[in-house]
Image: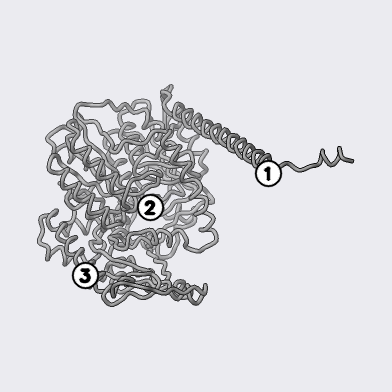
Amino acid sequence: MNTTQKETQPLGFGKTMLASALGFIIGTVVLSIISFIFSMIMLVSIVSKSMDNSKPLIGTDFAVELNLTGLVSEDSPNELASLFSSQSVSSIEQLLDAIGAAATDKRVHSLYLHLGGSNLSWAQAEELQEALKEFRSQCDKPILAYGDAFSQQEYYLATIADKIAVHPSGLIDFRGIGAEVMFYKGLLDKLGVHMELIRPTSCAYKSAGEVYTRTDMSDANREQVRSYINDIWNYAIENMAANRKLSVADLNKAADNLTAYMPDDALKAGLVDTLCFAQDIKTLLAKNYKVHKIVKAKRYAEQVSKKDKESRIALIYAEGDVVPGKNNSGTTAVYGDDIVKALTDAAQDKKVKAIVLRVNSPGGAVTASESMTRAVVEAKKSKPVIVSMSGLAASAGYEISCFGTKIVAHPTTLTGSIGVFATLPEVGSLLRQKLGITTDTVQTNRNSTGLTIYRPLSPAARAMMQKNVEDFYITFTQRVADGRGLQRSYVDSIARGRVWTGRQAKELGLVDTLGGLPLAMRIAAEEAGVKLEDCSVKKFPAKKSLWEQLMNRAEEGQEEEINARLNAIIPFYSEMKQWADMEPMQARLPFAIRID
């Protein structure tokens, strides 16, 4: 009996604690080993993939495939971004490199545009179409386009091809451009949240904050949206008609009546040349053009010889929302500190003869915008800074551009939006009525709690914020006037938060010439007094190492998972979180607008 009691006697407190601690340590070590092994597997996978891409292309008789069936970015994505993305990622940079090299490469017999499902913008489609026109002027190699389905931007690009094919069960989204804005005031009213929107009295077109204060488009916003979508469509349909040898009237009729949506109807209307499957295109390439191998543009571009030369042109990408700070997570945004450092480093690099700043941004934080604008001014003191605008270069995206030595934009670029606004939510009713939470205050001065989200703005706080946005609007328009050599009164008359297309902006003096990145490069070389062919391109800032990317990815993984779960539960969570994280004062395009 005593023996049994002794055998079942529980461990003492000290032994229990020791056992628990030992178990925790062992568990932590095991998890660390598993995590390390997983990281090594990822690293080996990335390195192997990179080595595969770097292997020399063997043989001849290639077709270079421009794969536009997934995400499209300006800059080439890093290895981790490609690995973790559920979609293929194509960069405008690599596609342009591939097109340029293929024209004179005897191994390449044709180009194959594989379209369908991308986020290609009108300006990016224009960029690639111009490159393909240049390709055609240098050689007689055919361009074939195929898609399971085409968005309008993809079809616009496809019209430059010698032959357009669509899947027999696919479709062509050909209906003209429509703009749709989502408004959240009704939702906020139900939640008991009131959003304060403060903007300069003259900035009626600065409509970004209206999505939280209105249930429909203001007259000013409707006017500007109608203006720029009509300009984009008129430009695009004229080019499509010319490329396909069709009339603008017939194309507009097809868009009005939706009579080109179905493949058979599109074939009858002359929008496409044939209905077939993707495998048929490969057979056609082999039979008619003696293509023995199809090479992805990404791999082909990485094989293109790019010798480092004594003279360099710096290329800096500013893509995404303008935000303060540094990029430690690998997300796509225009981080103020990173762009400032890139401009400074490029300006100080003696081998760099000129700088090209590629902008694709709807705008964002005022503080970051101001810092980057100053960096452009400082860099321009030592060498030319040429701005190349992609799909968007609006608001803060325009401010950082306006001091460029020259500004190059696409006809379909959305730019301008010269203005500012401030927003502040008031959630007192939500807390009281929905959650039963109340607040009380003690303050040393009259407005110590005048800028709180728990009660309406005090009159003094509202007046202060109004003065703040009015003062910055004057600063912003003066910046544009100084950068563009214009009178501030004139800038004010065309600013007021209004969005313009690249074609309209050129007429107004907000940009210098129409074209893409290759033209900006040529202008940069000319301004620096060097020949473009004697220069190599160096990107700033340098990309992070694989190890840095892995470590940053591990840190952000948990936050991404939490955000994904919240977004699945709470409607519009991602967008509302984005606004909650913003600085109070913003210079940005109405980012919630969707242009199809």
Q: Residue at x 16, y 48 (%)?
A: 377
Q: Earlier in the sequence, mark 2 or mark 1?
A: 1
Callout 1, which amino acid?
Answer: Phe
The dot on residue 467 is 3
Residue located 42% across and 74% down the image? 440
Q: Under tag 1, what secondary structure?
A: helix
Q: Which mark is residue 153?
A: 2
Q: Closer to the N terminus: mark 2 or mark 3?
A: 2
Q: Mark 1 — residue?
A: 13
Between label 2 and label 1, give the one nearer the viewer. Answer: 1
User: Measuring 33% from the left and 51% from the top, which residue is drawn there?
Assistant: 245
Question: Which three-letter amino acid code belongs to the residue tagged 3?
Answer: Lys
Instruction: Measuring from the top left, give residue 292's x and y in whole percent.
Output: 46, 27
Quarter of the picture holding the C terminus: bottom left
- Measure how far apart labels 2 and 3 are at the Cα level: 42 Å
Which one is in front, 521 or 249?
521
Residue 541 at x, y percent in the picture:
29, 38
Displayed quadrant of residue 362: bottom left
